[in-house]
Amino acid sequence: MNWSQLISRLEKRLQLPLPGAVAHEPLRAIPVGNLKPVFSHTLAPRPGGVLILLYEESGIIKFPLIKRTEYLGAHSGQVSFPGGKAEVGETSLLAALREGEEEIGIRRDDVKVLGVLTDFYVIPSNFIVTPVIATINSPIFKPDEREVARVLTARLDHLLLDEAVREKEILAAGKYPLRAPHFEVEGEIVWGATAMMLNEFRMVLKDICDPF
């Protein structure tokens, strides 16, 4: 399937019912033993958006992920999609585009939005996140040094492989052992909320894709 066929099929598929929790739950990390993280949020979840930004390079369809810098927060050092919380009066879609500009240096005017996946509740940070699927031509990424340690390049064909989903035990927040289903991109583990949203994208793609 070529680029234009994929985009046309994907845009149509995103208008149909989405797999949602059916795709999310198999990638949920499970505590090992009795030591478990506990989250007690008193405020309503905050809206946010993340960007799954497809582009073609030398005939290969790719999308960027970011490895976040180390900071005092729930997602320090983790791999995620570009994205973040919505500002006052901003939709989740616009938040995803703005964060894409701020974090990886793309111009929102160069981005074509195809649709969205199922809203996802990120428990540790108390966000309701909308994954926005979009395309861009020939991007040049300029990561924000304060927020982004590294931009990773994920390949769509690798995501669709049967062996793309792996599993290992990890230590979250330096002390909580978890059995984590995950993807691996450029030697980095993609787990948790990002992996769960990515698995929904993977299931949607499998609905429309011939073998690469």
Image (tube, rainbow, N blue to C red):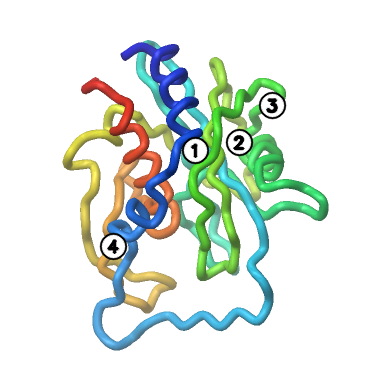
- Residue 50: where, in percent of width, then height? 57, 45
Instruction: Give the numbered dot on residue 180.
Output: 4
- Which is more N-terminal, label 4 or label 3? 3
| Distance of label 3 from label 4 (alpha carbons) | 34 Å
* Disc 1: which residue: 151
In this orientation, which residue lies closer to the viewer: 199 or 171? 199
Instruction: Give the numbered dot on residue 35.
Output: none
- Residue 7: where, in percent of width, then height? 45, 20
Q: Residue furthest front?
A: 16
For the residues bearing labels 1 and 2, Cβ distance under 8 angstroms: yes
Considering only vertical position in the picture, is 63 above or below 149? above
Residue type at mark 1 is: Val
* Disc 3: which residue: 107
Q: Residues within 10 Å of mark 3 (few under 14, many from 20)?
A: some
- Which is more N-terminal, label 2 or label 1? 2
In this orientation, which residue lies closer to the viewer: 75 or 163? 163
| Distance of label 1 from label 3 (alpha carbons) | 16 Å
Residue type at mark 2 is: Ile
Left or right: 164, with 45 as reference point: left
Give the secondary structure at mark 1: strand
Residue positioned 63% across, 24% down in the render: 111
Instruction: Give the numbered dot on residue 104.
Output: 2
